[in-house]
Image: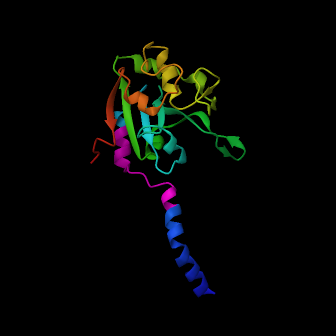
Amino acid sequence: MLKLKHLLLNLLTPFQKFIQRLGYIENNFTVEDVDYMAELCQAGDILGSYESGRFTSMFIKGEYDHIAMVTDDMMVIEAVGDKFVNGKNVGGVRKVPLKEWIWKKNHIFIMRHKTYGIGTKASKSYYTLIGMSYDYTFDRGNEKMYCSEIPYICYQQHDQYFLSNVPATKEILPIDYLACTSLELLWDTRRNSLR
């Protein structure tokens, strides 16, 4: 029986390796890296990220697949798809600890508004968004929210030209933030070395 088990496992080894590559890959950051990036952040900063193993990433144009924003209490506000834990939906618009958010990513960028004080104002504009459902249609202005829409909604109240490079009929993508002239790129783990 033991020989049969070993034979079967040996035959399935290529399949097992393939399945492992589809899953989550351990992150690239040390505790010191996470501490350093968290220290760089200020209220209102916009965070872009990439997580390997996320199936939906292949449908999002650009090298980043998620956007979030640092809140006035140095947490992160983000919108994620529905996820049920013990019958409760923990998806939609939610707040998570900054260091925890960074730790789960493979790559991140940090951007800040170029005009002093606007980031601080925007970091306080998220309160009415908490608890909204995730927007699977990626429409702006409805009662649901997708990740890239959160900073847009928060900043638009304080900078009418924010993300004016994106037509109102188009969904906002993480790559659009990198092209926004109102923002300055502070850190990008794909381009800056942490060590």
Q: Is residue 25 left or right of residue 12?
A: left
The region drawn magenta spans 20-38
Query: Is residue 42 visible in the rendered structure shown here?
Result: no
Name the quadrant containing residue 84. top right
Where is residue 173? Give x, y as percent: 47, 31
Q: Tell me what residue is drawn at x 46 percent, y 19 percent.
A: 155
Image vertical order of residue 68 relative to residue 183, above or below: below
Q: Quadrant of residue 185?
A: top left
The residue that appears at 35% across and 36% down in the rendered structure is: 39
Residue furthest right in the image: 87
* Along the line of sight, the residue nearer the viewer: 88 or 144: 144
Horizontal side, residue 95 vs residue 33: left or right: right
Instruction: Name the residue rendered at 32%, 35% in the picture.
Output: 187
Task: Judge whether residue 158 can be spotted in this image.
Answer: yes
- The percent coordinates of residue 15 (x first, y second) are 53, 68
Q: Residue at x 56, y 31 (%)?
A: 146
Residue 43 x %, y %: 42, 26
Q: How is the image coloured?
A: rainbow
Q: How many marks?
A: 0
Q: Nearer the viewer, residue 193 or 39?
A: 193
Please tell me whether residue 26 is drawn above or below residue 144 in the rendered image.
Answer: below
Report x, y in % for residue 17: 49, 66
36 falls in the magenta region: yes
- Residue 53 on the magenta segment: no
Quarter of the image that includes the N terminus: bottom right
Q: Nearer the viewer, residue 45 or 136?
A: 136
Note whether 135 is above or below 122 in the view shown.
Answer: below
